[in-house]
Amino acid sequence: MRMEHTTCNGSSGLGLYSRPFIESFEETPMLVAVLTYMGYGILTIFGYLRDFLRDWKIERCHVAREREEQRDFVPLYQDFENFYTRNLYMRIRDSWNRPICSVPGAKVDLVERVSPDYNWTFDYTGKVVEGVINMGSYNYLGFAENTGYCADASAEVTMKYGVGVASTRQEMGNLDRHEEMEELVAKFLGVESAMAFGMGFATNSMNIPALTGKGCLILSDELNHASLVLGARLSGSTIRVFKHNNMQSLEKMLRDAIVHGQPRTHRPWKKILILVEGIYSMEGSIVRLPEVIALKKRYRAYLYLDEAHSIGALGPGGRGVVDYFGLDPRDVDVMMGTFTKSFGAAGGYIGGRKELLEYLRSHSHSAVYAASMSPPVVEQIIASMKCIMGEDGTTLGRDRVQQLAENTLYFRRRLTEMGFIIYGNNDSPVVPMMLYMPAKIGAFGREMLKRNIGVVVVGFPATPIIESRARFCISAAHTKDMLDTVTIPPCLAQNGYLFHTKDIKRAQLMFLMRHLRSVCLVNAAHATMLTTTILFSLCFLL
């Protein structure tokens, strides 16, 4: 297993960490990789066979086709994407987009559906699957609820302002609640000013082009979210991608950018912007922020930090990855985050210096053209954020932050003890569990749902082709009994053996060692022979 471990005295951390920094990423075993490629190969062969049957009308075709007079037109879409969708994705389409008819809290109610044509269409049976343990929603602090202080406050604002203002902030859509929310966000983050937007994805994709342009360089982590990637592309800047959370790779690119400058002309870059995330939602890893800040200061670059998943979920005060490492928020030039995960609302924000926010208010497409945020959504943000900060007169928010941290450590420890292969940082509430094989993606999700547990399963192209996984999202609303229900037989443990997602090497070695210990108590000669056998087994297993 490849482990990354950095402490305050570690050479890789340059003395920047005040606490152990541990992340686990086990490389895919060669045999598993080969079998996974073979699985995709077999699915591809059968896909071409089914396309042949569809062309000859032996199998019914559900795919939209070009009209005969447009056969010689250039396709509007990539042919491989269409092939992958109809022959691989459709086989397990029922594993995603399951409709719910309740609040997406710790438990949800699912609308039962069946497919008469192998997942091309779905029919609803009218039945409801009640009390499904929700391990898939980004409900980190448990604010996805329709009762309580936050819900009551939102309902009251709805009666006063309505559900929307149907205008931009520059025209008739600026309410006192919007200004109060932005002041509260700035106070929560510890920055001079903040600005809110109605959509988290657009917060990245529409603001990055306002910050950089032609002649600028963007250094982006290879696992950054699609919104960051799109924003970088729309900016027209030169984009270079560094290895995930690899500070040596980032520093090399920074050094090369300073030394060589722009291509052909070798003029200095107008601006160098580093794009990173707080928590990476597919890997469960946490950015090495102290090292990133040290590098950006050394090479005079700017830092754009996306805290969509880390805000509210990390740090003793729930203030994100900056709070988690005990750093100064002023060292981050652009602090971005969303309200959808930890706050049970919608939209996103950008925080930073006052000059930066004044510039974005007049140059950002999201600020100038987008509709203003819905008043009840704004009130949900205000109420939940005040709760986290303790300004509601209770310790409920602080208790939720603490409960999330405890649930995360408990669930990760349980999976590790059971021998499952999990990725990410020990403190990350995003817990990816490796499945590898394409056949396991749909099967695992279906089997867990049979046991009233809702999970998210992920495969290619959202992950590398040999790293399909199930992703658990921990919430402060989860009770210990719920987490135990997920991990005890006959649920996760049984599925682990059924789909061979456990660390087989580790399990085999532990069995051999226990057997050796029992033999040693009986016969020393037999113990010697068994020791030799174990040594050969180690060579084979490792």
Image: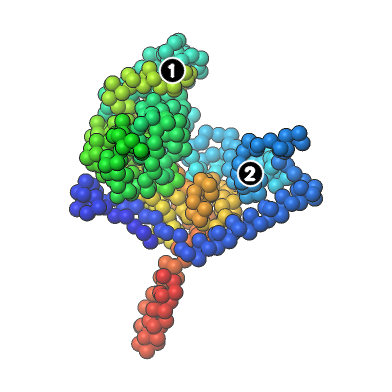
Report whether 326 appears left or right of 420.
left
Q: Can you say which quadrant of the picture contains the C terminus?
A: bottom left
Residue picked out by circle 2: 79
Q: How many marks?
A: 2
Q: CA distance from mark 1 to mark 2?
A: 37 Å
Determine if residue 165 is in view.
Answer: yes
Which residue extends farthest bottom? 525
Q: Is residue 349 above or below residue 294?
A: above
Q: Which mark is residue 368?
A: 1
Residue drawn at x 72%, y 34% as measured from the top left: 70
Q: Secondary structure at mark 1?
A: helix
Residue drawn at x 47%, y 18% as measured from the top left: 369
Residue drawn at x 36%, y 38% as measured from the top left: 264
Amino acid residing under circle 2:
Asp
Q: Is residue 38 above or below residue 99?
A: below
Report whether 295 appears left or right of 217.
left
Determine if residue 408 is in view.
Answer: no
Amino acid residing under circle 1:
Val
Residue 419 in percent (x, y) is at: 43, 61
Foreground pick, 111 / 363: 363
Q: Can you say which quadrant of the picture contains the N terminus?
A: bottom left
- Identify the image quadrant of residue 268: top left
